[in-house]
Image (spheres, rainbow, N blue to C red):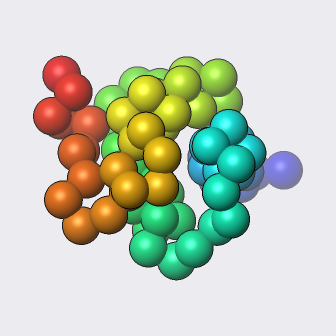
Amino acid sequence: MPTHDKHFRMLSEAVQAWYRYYEVEPDDQASQTLCSAAIEFFNEGARSLEDVTTLLIGTYVGRWATRVNAPTSAAVH
């Protein structure tokens, strides 16, 4: 499996873990926010599933945090 496929799978699993953690059903708006954030965290150096998942869960606390005025990872630093 090419490296970029492994990274894509890991980022997808991190987003899915966020949904499981908060026990909410996936929706397009939350998924867009979470996927963008997961990519940003990865680009900033988070390379493991656990790291990306932890950052998503800590940054986006529940579904409402994924809405339009949601914080970005830059706001956390």
Which quadrant, please, contains the C terminus?
A: top left
Image coordinates of residue 20 in percent, x first then y, are 73, 45
- Tell me where residue 71 sits by quadrant: top left
Residue in front for this viewpoint, 22 or 74 = 22
How many dots with numbers? 0
Residue beneath the point at 24% across and 67% down? 68
Inspect this view and state whether residue 4 appears. no
Residue 21: x and y in percent read 68, 38
Query: What residue is shown at x 66% (from left), y 30% (from top)?
Result: 49
Q: Residue at x 21, y 27 (%)?
A: 76
The picture quadrant where one finds residue 10 is top right
* Residue drawn at x 70%, y 48% as measured from the top left: 23
Residue in front for this viewpoint, 41 or 20:
20
Q: Which residue occupies the foreground of this view, 72 or 10?
A: 72
The residue at the far bottom in this view is: 28
> Where residue 64 sits: x, y (%)?
38, 56
Residue 19 visible (yes or no)? yes
Percent position (x, y) of residue 17?
Answer: 70, 42
